[in-house]
């Protein structure tokens, strides 16, 4: 069986690595360098906390975390455990966090509800808050390290990984994929997996597949500070967030995952953060996090996030036989990549559909 994975971000590379454990000829195509797209333009947090957690989403996180935890325990990959806060500014949101804490008591990490006065120890202005939900367990990984290791392991298993090679077309016959046309020639394929991140809608159109995928702009400022602590990942009620990078840098941005506010964008179009966003995030961050009030902006970037109506990835087979999706991770690529890759690899290689794929299947939106 010949499997072509299109997209060399963290999801595509994890798929290639997972398929190594099954009898398949694996080809991975990446039009740039591995991990150069959205994967490189993230803040790399393994995200445990949500204000409205579901047991199913937490089960995906727990399975993904086991993959990372094993490697962390072996000192094979780096992980900076900095903790995480969801910060309320209204009493209604605090009530929502209290309900979330009850869910986490049964599914997920250890959490603690904090009062406003407790937040000063984290560098947060207590007068701007109504309390927070805290876990010490969150932290950030190194996406480049993960992509490099998984790609090396996939190659050791015989995977053909091609960078600088773009998929330009997907051939079908009688509703079944037969080949992928590329800038480096044609590759025969029994299975094609769309793991192209922001480019996923473009690939879907090649085979006439429709999926509810839209884009949001993951705009990030890098602030230089003279701090005496590493800030935890801190997400405010408004969606604004900060994440410490050692003691001298802070990443600041705004979480934008709402499907209703998203649209399809051209991922090849150059973009900048923009003056209005720059000023708003810098000013709001200075007010909410006094520790970075005098910080200088050292860098900025944008990574497009591909979002879905329910916030869950779209993973599995489509109406075109042999054509599968592994996309729409809604800004949680680092978090979900291991479980998405492993589940789909198992299904593609064995034909046995893991129960979790029923909840992630493309046809759930039909």
Image (tube, rainbow, N blue to C red):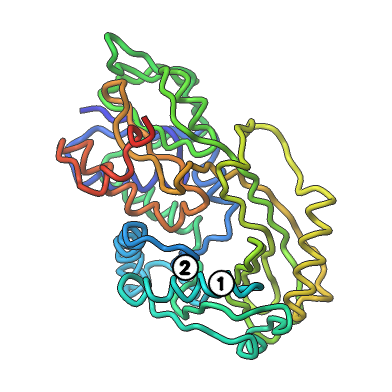
Percent of width and height locating residue 231: 63, 78
Circle nearer the N terminus (2, 1): 2
Asked which quadrant contains residue 315, the reply is: top left
Q: Is residue 154 above or below residue 316?
A: below
Percent of width and height locating residue 188: 30, 19
Image disc number at residue 49: 2
Q: Residue at x 56, y 43 (%)?
A: 37
Q: CA distance from mark 2 to mark 1?
A: 7 Å
Name the foreground residue: 311 vs 163.
311
The residue that label 1 is drawn on is 86
Q: Residues within 10 Å of mark 1 (few under 14, many from 20)?
A: many
Q: Residue at x 35, y 20 (%)?
A: 187
Q: Quadrant of the N terminus?
A: top left
Say which element carries label 1: strand
Q: Is residue 262 above or below residue 55?
A: above
Q: Quadrant of the C terminus?
A: top left
Percent of width and height locating residue 86: 56, 72
Q: Residue at x 63, y 68 (%)?
A: 236
Name the foreground residue: 55 vs 289.
55
Q: Is residue 296 above or below residue 303?
A: below
């Amino acid at each position: 069986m010949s499997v072509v994975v299109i997209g060399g971000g963290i999801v595509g590379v994890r798929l290639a690595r997972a398929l190594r454990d099954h009898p398949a000829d694996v080809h991975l195509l990446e039009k740039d360098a591995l991990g150069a797209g959205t994967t490189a333009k993230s803040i790399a947090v393994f995200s445990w906390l949500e204000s409205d957690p579901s047991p199913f989403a937490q089960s995906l996180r727990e399975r993904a975390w086991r993959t990372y935890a094993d490697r962390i325990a072996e000192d094979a990959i780096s992980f900076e455990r900095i903790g995480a806060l969801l910060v309320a500014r209204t009493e209604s949101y605090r009530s929502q966090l209290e309900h979330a804490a009850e869910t986490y008591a049964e599914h997920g990490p250890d959490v603690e509800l904090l009062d406003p006065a407790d937040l000063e120890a984290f560098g947060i202005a207590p007068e701007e808050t109504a309390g927070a939900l805290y876990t010490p367990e969150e932290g950030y990984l190194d996406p480049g390290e993960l992509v490099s290791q998984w790609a090396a392991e996939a190659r050791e298993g015989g995977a053909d990984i091609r960078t600088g090679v773009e998929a330009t077309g997907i051939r079908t016959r009688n509703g079944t994929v037969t080949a992928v046309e590329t800038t480096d020639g044609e590759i025969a394929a029994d299975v094609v997996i769309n793991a192209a991140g922001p480019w996923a809608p473009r690939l879907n159109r090649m085979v006439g597949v429709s999926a509810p995928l839209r884009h949001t702009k993951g705009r990030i400022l890098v602030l230089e500070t003279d701090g005496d602590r590493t800030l935890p990942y801190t997400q405010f009620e408004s969606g604004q967030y900060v994440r410490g990078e050692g003691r001298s840098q802070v990443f600041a941005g705004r979480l934008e995952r709402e499907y209703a506010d998203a649209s399809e964008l051209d991922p090849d179009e150059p973009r900048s953060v923009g003056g209005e966003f720059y000023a708003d995030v810098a000013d709001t961050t200075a007010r909410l996090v006094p520790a970075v009030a005098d910080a200088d902006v050292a860098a900025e970037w944008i990574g497009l996030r591909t979002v879905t109506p329910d916030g869950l990835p779209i993973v599995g087979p489509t109406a075109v036989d042999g054509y599968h999706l592994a996309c729409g991770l809604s800004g949680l690529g680092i978090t979900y990549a291991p479980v998405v890759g492993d589940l789909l690899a198992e299904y593609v290689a064995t034909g046995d559909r893991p129960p979790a794929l029923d909840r992630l299947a493309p046809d759930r939106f039909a």
